[in-house]
Structure formats: structure tokens, C-alpha cells
Image (spheres, grey):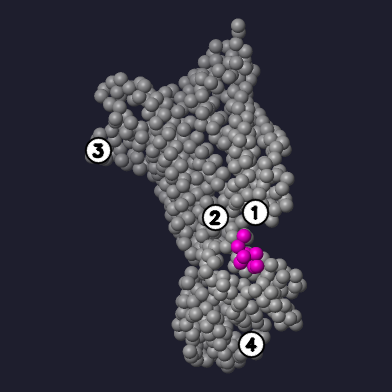
Amino acid sequence: MPMSFLQFASNNVRRNSRAYFAYFLSSAFMVMIFFTYAMFFFHPDIGQTGTGGIARQGMQIAEVILYVFSFLFVLYSTGSFLKARSKEFGILTLLGAENRQMNLLIFLENLLIGLLSIGAGIVSGLLLSKLFLLLASKTVVTEQLGFYFPAKAILLTIAAFVLLFIVISMATVMMIRRRRILEMIKGASKPKEEPKTSWILSLLGLVLLVVSCLILSQDELTFKMLCITAVTGILGTYFFFTQLSVMVIRCLKRSRRFLWQGPRLLWISEMAYKLKDNARVLFMVTVVISIACMSTAFVLSIEQQSRRDFESMTFQIEFNSYEPATADANVAKFEDQLRKEGLAYEKWESKRMYHFIRGSSGEDYEYVIPVSSYNKAASILGGPQIERIQSDEAIRIVPPNKEAPTEEMADLDLGPGEKNVRITKNRVFNLPGSTLYLVVADDVFSKILNERPQIDIMQYYKVPQWDHNGLVTEDSSEYKISKRLEDHAGSMSDAYARTRAVNYIDLKNMTGIFSFVGVFIAALFSLSSASFLYFKLFVELDNDRAVYRSLSKVGLDTREMKRSSAIQIGVLFLLPVLVAAAQTAIVMNGIKDQFDFHEVWTPIFTAAGAFLLAQVIYFLIIRSRYVRQLKKVMV
């Protein structure tokens, strides 16, 4: 019974299943994540939750990012498959296969893998949907999301990815059509040429990386500077893999004392070819992991900073009525509400004005307050009092997470003929706002008021019973009372209240959305990067088997083969994540001051460690499969 064309295509897929495995797994994972996000997006209860609207927008953005990445991943992977199988296609053409038949074969193979990926992804998504919705309820929205049959999500996923695989299949047909038969038959069997590198491009890559680091070390970073940093960093990374890394291997090869030791000659000689052949893949993997690692570290830094801000907030409630005519009445109403909630409190009324600093470290501002006001706050918070201050001096109050400016004079507008005050000392103390305060004598503050009567009056309330509550949750009494207080202040047309509990929970919910969206995209990026490398290794497997078989005939044993192949695979898998970790550390330290992050090393190590662990697991699995194939040909 003659074989149908569809059977022929399915047999080809089955025969190449070893190489297709990682590609299929990554594609199915993409479909699963896309489907689960769509299932969340179309959930009938999501619009009724407090953060549902923001979460839905986040999912929508994630769907677009995921779909664009899926298109690029499938396009690149398919192009690599065609290159690896060009000899097979050349033989079929030589045996009489027409262009129409070749096009149909390639189209059917790609579509078959695509349909299998879509089916596996949707089924996996349905099986994990209950767990996904439970996780979404915990991290993104506060209310429980029930299970429902996601018909719209299924239809959207099928339509989106069927279209994607059809477009990619048509594009691959165009790729193979341009090649000649002789070129296809030679395929990957062409003899390897000595990898070519350029000292100029190697130095250029190094210079670009140094330039990006120098820009990030500046005190003030503008959007333009960040764009330049991104461009120089990406170009520098590209030249690092295509030129500089190969140049380093070439230098190692010239050192006979280092080279002629054990199996070093084998793996160093092969490493130059592997780095050059896989330079673009390593570059893409590094960029993908860097983006995911930086995003993860950034979100973790925000979460860490929000916890620190909550714990260091000296006054749990602040209230402002910005219309002087109604200020006293509004304050009285708000304090009446505090008493109705059963809260005992200590109050600090802060009368202050802005003072801009223009110095060597850039531009900043600080609040100017009289010494009597400072002593009142210090008394409530248990801080040191300022016993005496001269009319020509000032004391700068610096929060623990800031560095004091170096300027010694304060250019205050005290009126005609008056001298500027001299800053005699800096004192570390945590006043509201986590900003700088300039404490002056009461009579000096009165002179400033005469020249500049516009001042800012804020009411701060310390609730002793909340001092040792720890981090709040949405079920805690502090959060519920704080929410009612903010709503009460919001009912006044010219006033507002801010509380540490509501600020913390709102930010926690926001970062929860980013974490929920980002963790799956980061996992997808990590798996896809492993898929790229897995496929490239198994494309070169036949050539490596021939090399190791020949070497085994002249004395190479299995232990040396394992060591040599493990080093080569390890470099390919671990070098990108190490470069990405270094880039993440440089970028996060560069932007730390821009976002007032107190400490970023813990988020950096957490994010980089997670990706490194994932790459190590991928490395161990793929090394095991790879070595198993090589052992079969050892004599």
C-alpha cells in the first residue's frame, strides 16, 4: 500500500523527534502560558475585583509580548531545522521531488508540529487551570476566582497559534526555495574553516561594554542616557560573543603550557568553533535572560523597598487639607473619625516650605522647619532634641537611607540685607517623607514666612497600638481602619489622607500582578533559551560522534570524552547566564539611586541564582542525553 504524503511528513517528524523534542516542548509551553493568560483575561469575575482592571491590562500586555516572542522563536527554530536538514531536502530534490511537493512536505511538517503543540498546550492549561486560578487569586486579586469553561480562551489560542504556524510554514517554504541542490546536499558537512576574528571588533565590543558601565555610574540618569546604555550594552554583548570570546580561546591555544594538559587540547580546539558557530544563539540567549533577570530583580527590589518603607514609616497616618479656609474644619472632622475608630494617637502638625539645593551632586529639595516643630516630632518619636540653635545656623536632618549633600550654606530668602544661614551639622533621623529637612531657629523661620507666606501644613498621626503589628494583610484591622480613614478623607472635596497600610497593600497588589505575569514569561524565556542550545547541540551531534569515534580509536577513553563534552556544553549553557547576571548587577546598581532602592544585591542574587539554577538543571539533563549518544560510538 503506497504511503500518503501526510504519512511521509509524519514519519519525518517522528524520525527527527530527538531534535524536535525541545522545540515541541517550548512551543507547547508557549501555548499553555498564552492560553492560561487568556483564560484569566476572559474570566467573568475578574472585572468585579478591586485590582481586576489593572490585572486584565497586565495580562493583555503579556499576551502581546508572548505572541511576538513566540513568532520570533518559531521562525528562528524553523530556519535552524531547515539548515540542519538541507542535505535530506537536497537528496529528495535529486531523486525527483518537485518544488510543489517539497513545499507541501515542509508546510505539513511545520503545521503538524504546530497543531500538536497547540493541542498539548491547551490540554496542559486546562489540567492546570484550577491551580492557575488559585494562584491568581492569591497574588493578583483578593477575591476567589472560580473555575469556568474557557471557550473564548480556547478559540483565541487556537486561532492565534494556527495563524502563527501557517505564516511561519509559508515563510520556511520561501527559505528552502532559494537554495540550490548541490548547496543543500553539502548541508552541514562542509569542512570547518578557522574561526575569523578581528582585534578591532573585539576591542570595540570591550569599549562598548565599558561605556555602558560608565554611563550607569553617573549620579543622574536621563531617559536618553538609558537608551544609549541599552544600545551600547547590546552591541557590546554581541561583539563579546562573536569576537572577544573567540579571541580569548585563540590566545589560550597559543599557550602550549596550558594547552598540552590532559584533554584541554581537545575541548579548547573545539570550543573556538562552537563559540563562533553558536555566537548568535548565545547572544540571543544572553539578551533574553538579561531582560528576564533584570525585570525579576527590579520587581523584587520594589517589594523589598516597600517592606522597608512600611517598617520605617514613623507616622502611620498623614492628612492634608489644602484649602486654608476649610483646613481647621476638615482636620476636626478627620480627628473625630479617628476617635470613632477607637484610635489613640499622637499628632505632629508640620509647617514647612520647600528649599531647593543646587550643588555638585545635582538638584534636590529639602523641607525647612522651625526648631520648635522638630522638637515636637522628636518628642513623639523618641528622638534627640535640639536644645539650642543660632539665628545664623541650620541643622540638616538626613533620613537613614540618604546621603547628606556636601553644601555648607543654605541659600534661604530671609529678606534684604540678611545673610544666608550656615549648615553646622548633619543629623540622621527619620522624619516623614524620607527626605531632607533643614531645621532653623524659630525667628529665622518667621522671617522666611514674611518673604514667602506660602507654606505646606501637614498633619501626621502616630498610633502606638500599631507600632508592633508587623506587615499588614488585607484582613488585618490596621488595613481595614486605614481604608475607612482614606475613604472618609476622600469624601471631603479639598482634603486627602494617606496611610502606610493602604500604601503597602496597593503596592503589594501591583507588584503581585507584575510577579504573576513576569514569572511565567521568565520561565518561558529560560526554557526557550535552553531549547535554542539543545537544538544547536543535537544538530552538531553527527559531526561530534564522528570526531569522538575517530579519537577513541587512537586512545581517547570514555572519562576524557565525558569531561571534554561536559566543559563544552557547560560553557554554552552557563556563560550566557553569568554574563546576564553581571549585566543585571551593573544595571541595578546604576538605577538604584533613581528609584531610592536601599539595597539591591539580595534581589540581584535571588534573580540571578534562580536563572543559574534553571540553566544548571537544563545542562545536567542535556549533558546526560548528549553523552549517552556519544558513548554509543566509542570504540
Disc nearest the viewer among 2 and 4: 2
Q: Magenta segment: does it hold 240? A: no
Q: Is residue 481 magenta?
A: yes
Measure the C-alpha gap from mark 3 to mark 1: 65 Å
Q: Is residue 312 left or right of residue 344?
A: left
- Nearest to N terminus: mark 3 or mark 1: 1
Residue at which label 2 appears: 299
Residue depicted at 29% across the width and 23% down the height: 552
Q: Label 3 crowding class (10 Å Cα cut-off): few <14, some 14-19, many 20+? A: few
Can you identify the residue that label 3 sits on? 256
Vertical placement of 522 versus 558: above or below?
A: below
Which residue is the site of mark 1? 142
Determine whether label 4 and label 3 are within 8 Å by CB.
Answer: no
Which residue lies at the image location 54% right of the left edge and 59% below the top edge?
Answer: 302
The CA span between labels 2 and 4 is: 43 Å
User: The residue tagged with tag 1: helix, strand or loop?
Assistant: loop
Taking the spot 53% from the left edge, 21% from the top edge, the residue there is 14
Task: Report the span colored magenta.
Answer: 475-482
Coordinates of residue 549 in the picture (x, y in percent):
33, 22
The residue lying at 48 percent from left, 89 percent from top is 387
How far across and how far down the image is residue 91, in percent?
Answer: 52, 15
**Residue 44 falls in which quadrant of the image?**
top right
Q: Disc number at residue 449? A: 4
* Circle 4: residue type: Leu
Left or right: residue 5 compared with residue 15: right
C-alpha span from label 4 to label 3 = 79 Å
Q: Earlier in the sequence, mark 1 or mark 2?
A: 1
Dot placed on the residue nearer the N-terminal end, 4 or 1: 1
